[in-house]
Image (tube, rainbow, N blue to C red):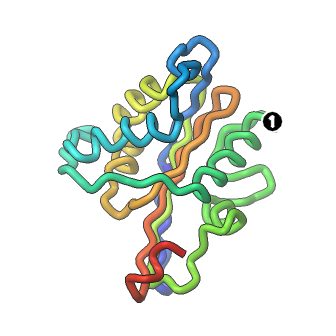
Amino acid sequence: MQNVEINRSKLFLVIPLFFFVSFTNDTSFTGKNFSFKDEVLNRINQVRTQGCNCGKVFMPPVAPVVWNEKLATAAAKHAQDMANQHYFSHESLNGDQIRNRFEKVGYGTTGFQRYVIGENIAQGQQSIEQVNRELFKSESHCKNLMNPAFKEVGAYVYNYYWVEDFGGRYPFYSNQADK
């Protein structure tokens, strides 16, 4: 997992991992009405809205996250990069960190009072159900998934590499939140 909170001049960094999945033997990915985005959101938000234990710490219910296409694009690019270049890390081989990857896809910080970003990565899981079950069992990943500061998520899986990117941007003015 990786978290970064920027409050004007302060930087906060925490690193847990996310998830990795393949669709090879999972018929849920081949169904006519299957939606990756909806399945990811449903599985995460079901737990977020009920609360759960992350390790020995109970995390109370928090608001659901919504899908963000820019975060999904950042997740896709990182999952593909890890798979194609055969590594597993929050830091890309070119030195990019999560903040760099988010900025490259337009998930910006200009005009925001503060923002929080995070990432979970995982490798080898066969389904969204499996990856989420394993992530919620990991204390640091679970805390990322249950972080009330996160308002948005984007996820992607490529060749058994899962990436889930989170964000929470807090504007100076309420009409800037969607930019």
Please say if 156 is above or below 5. above
> Number of numbered discs present?
1
Q: Quadrant of residue 20?
A: top right
Q: Is residue 92 left or right of residue 17?
A: right
Image quarter (top left, top right, bottom left or bottom right) of the C terminus = bottom right
The furthest residue to the front: 32
Q: Is residue 24 left or right of residue 46?
A: right
> Residue tagged by mark 1?
84
Image x and y of residue 33, in percent: 50, 26
Residue under the point 39% across and 45% down: 140
Q: Secondary structure at mark 1?
A: helix
Q: Residue 164: x and y, percent? A: 53, 45
Residue sitting at the far top: 25
Q: Is residue 139 toward the left or the right of residue 70 in the image?
A: left
| Residue shown at the point (56%, 77%) measured from the top left | 109
Q: Is residue 7 visible?
A: no
Q: Is residue 171 above or below residue 59?
A: below
Residue 47's x, y, as percent?
A: 28, 39
Residue depicted at x 58% and y 83%? 110
Is residue 31 in sight in this rendering? yes
Residue 92 placement (x, y as % from top left): 73, 51
